[in-house]
Amino acid sequence: MRDLENPDMLVPPATDAGTIPNLKFSFSDTHMQLNHGGWSREVTVRELPVATTLAGVNMALTPGGVRELHWHQQAEWSCMILGRARTTAVDQDGIS
């Protein structure tokens, strides 16, 4: 099924010089972490070697669920598709 989603990975188009690494990785192909407040699936440089400066997380939280406090050097972005959330951001000096 995954091959059908990315046919160019099997037979690249004639214009592909082979100089661009694979930039696709499905959250469905990574480990799901199940917690009390929901679940998460993370993609980092371990799963997608080209992602040296970016990590992504696909997650679902139950009402009242909390994402653990964490920090890392990579950039982080998020898109909220459904629901409401309260977010706090703190920089490396502890300033929010």
Image: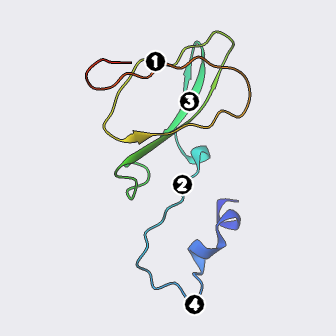
Instruction: Report the Cα–Cα distance between label 1 and label 2.
Output: 24 Å
Which residue was labeled with disc 3?
40
Sequence-first tag of 1 and 2? 2
Mark 4 secondary-structure assignment:
loop
C-alpha gap between disc 2 and disc 3: 15 Å
Identity of the amino acid at label 3?
Ser
Point out residue 37 in the picture as x, y percentages from the top left corner.
60, 14
Tell me the quadrant of the picture where the C terminus can be found.
Answer: top left
Of labels 1 and 4, earlier in sequence is 4
The mark that comes first in sequence, 3 or 1, is 3
Real-space Cα distance between discs 1 and 4? 46 Å
Q: Residue at x 57, y 47 (%)?
A: 29
Between 27 and 89, which is closer to the camera in this rendering? 89
Which residue is situated farthest in the right direction here? 82
Instruction: Identify the mark at residue 25; answer none if there is no mark.
Output: 2
Q: Position of residue 13 (x, y in %)?
A: 60, 85
User: How far is disc 3 from disc 1 in space, using C-alphas?
Assistant: 11 Å
Q: Residue furthest top?
A: 64
Looking at the rendered image, the disc whose residue lies closer to the viewer, 3 or 1, is 1
Q: Which residue is mark 4?
A: 14
Q: Earlier in the sequence, mark 2 or mark 4?
A: 4
Cβ–Cβ under 8 Å for marks 2 and 3: no
